[in-house]
Every structure is written in C-alpha cells, then in structure tokens.
Amino acid sequence: MRQCDRIIKAYLIFLLIFTANAAHAFYTVQESGDLLKPEQMQMAAELQFVTSGNDGINLLARFDKGFDNDSNLRFVGGLGTTDFILGGYFKWVPYPDYEEQPAIGFTFGAQLARYEGENELSGRIIPFVSKKLDSDNGEFTPYVSLPFGFSNYNDHGRSPLQLVIGSRYRHQEFDKCDFNAEIGFDLNDAATYISLGAIFPAFE
C-alpha cells in the first residue's frame, strides 16, 4: 500500500510540473509546513493587494484536503482585478517541523487565470521553510518561500520569480480561525503584493 501511495505521489508531481507552464504575478503562497490528516479538510479566504505592475485587489478561496502523512491537496478559486483564477496544488513536506528542525516542503501547482480578456495557463513550484513558535500572545508559524515557474499570457512566455515572507498566527483564546499575512517581492516578471488571510478549523 505504501509503495502504491509513493507511485501516485510521484505521478501527481510529474503531472503538475510537465502539464503546466507556471506562475503568474498575482499568485500568492499562504503556505507552511502544517499538514492535514488524510481524512481532514480545511477552508480559507484571502484578500490580496497587488501594489506594483497590474495593481489591484483579488479575493481568493482555498480548499485543502489531506492526502497522506506528508502531503496535502489544495484547490484555489478567485476573482477581482484578475477576472478569475482556478487552480490545483500538491504540497509535499519531506522534512516536518520537529524539535529544532524547521519544516521544509514544496508545493507544485497549475492554474488557469483570465486577465483583461486573455487567458493565462501557468504552473509554479514553491519551495518553502517554516517554523512554529510559541509565545505569550499565541502561536506563530513564520515562513519564507521563493516561488518560481513559467507562464504563457497573450502568447508571451514569462519566468516569474518572487521572494515571499509571511506568518500564520493562532490566538490562544480564539478558536474561530487562524490568521495569515504575507508580503511578496518581485524578483523577475512578477509583482509586489500584500495579502491577508483567514484559515478556518479543519473538519472531517
């Protein structure tokens, strides 16, 4: 059974990398080493403020599903300055957050977006590092990522690269949702943005 799971996982990674053309400037990360159990699901909402390039506001909804002990699936939908965004991602965390070791993971994904009447098919690879930290004010999970990939928009290929820094926050006395904030910096063919998110409790 374990061997079968590994084959499925390898196939999903292969499919996401080689059937997409990767990342768009409007896309965000909102990701850490936290994992859902295979039977768990989770929903989140995010408001993104793009401050450079094609500036504007996007509203995104995310649905996460546990896949196995070290990976999750994610589905994304959104609208706003970008007419619509639809995508799917596979998160793999081979090195979990344990004692002094930070979580190290990768997210592979593909998205279809429409902006100013033109479609963009894109895919991205998102390496990230995160570490859960306890404090008197609650639990913080800061993360850093360098998402990159390739995209095709209006018959032009791009290779976006960003530096993303963010953190998830869980208040010790508020269990309705966790909060997430991040900032993304344009390193190549991307955009600078700020995003704020709410992550609702996992359910089965």
Image (cartoon, rainbow, N blue to C red):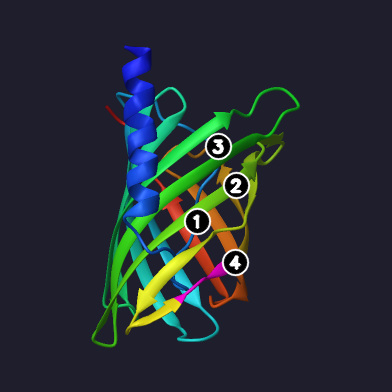
Q: Residue drawn at (52%, 52%), measured in percent from left and top?
A: 126
User: Contact, CB < 8 Å: mark 3 with mark 2?
Assistant: yes
Q: Please, what is the three-letter code of the amino acid marked with disc 2?
A: Phe
Q: Please, what is the three-letter code of the amino acid marked with disc 4?
A: Gln
Q: In the figure, residue 61 lies in which quadrant?
A: bottom left
Gap between marks 2 and 1 measured at Cα: 9 Å
The residue at which mark 2 appears reads as: 128
Residue 162, label in figure: 4
Residue 67, label in figure: none
Q: Please, what is the three-letter code of the amino acid marked with disc 3?
A: Gly
Q: Nearer the viewer, residue 97 or 25?
A: 25
Q: Position of residue 170 (x, y in %)?
A: 55, 41
Gap between marks 4 and 3 measured at Cα: 19 Å
Residue 33, label in figure: 3
Q: Residue drawn at (33%, 36%), measured in percent from left and top?
A: 11
Q: Please, what is the three-letter code of the amino acid marked with disc 1?
A: Val
User: For the image shown, how many numbered marks are present on the structure?
Assistant: 4
Q: Position of residue 171 (x, y in %)?
A: 56, 41
Please give the range of residues in magenta.
158-162
Q: Secondary structure at mark 1?
A: loop
Q: Position of residue 109 (x, y in %)?
A: 39, 52
Q: Is residue 68 visible?
A: yes
Above or below, 141 relative to 147: above
Magenta span: chief secondary structure: strand
Q: Earlier in the sequence, mark 3 or mark 2?
A: 3
- Dot 3 surroundings within 10 Å: few (below 14), some, or many (20 or more)? many
Gap between marks 4 and 1 measured at Cα: 10 Å
Above or below, 190 relative to 133: below
Residue 29, label in figure: 1
Q: Secondary structure at mark 4?
A: strand
User: Contact, CB < 8 Å: mark 2 with mark 1?
Assistant: yes
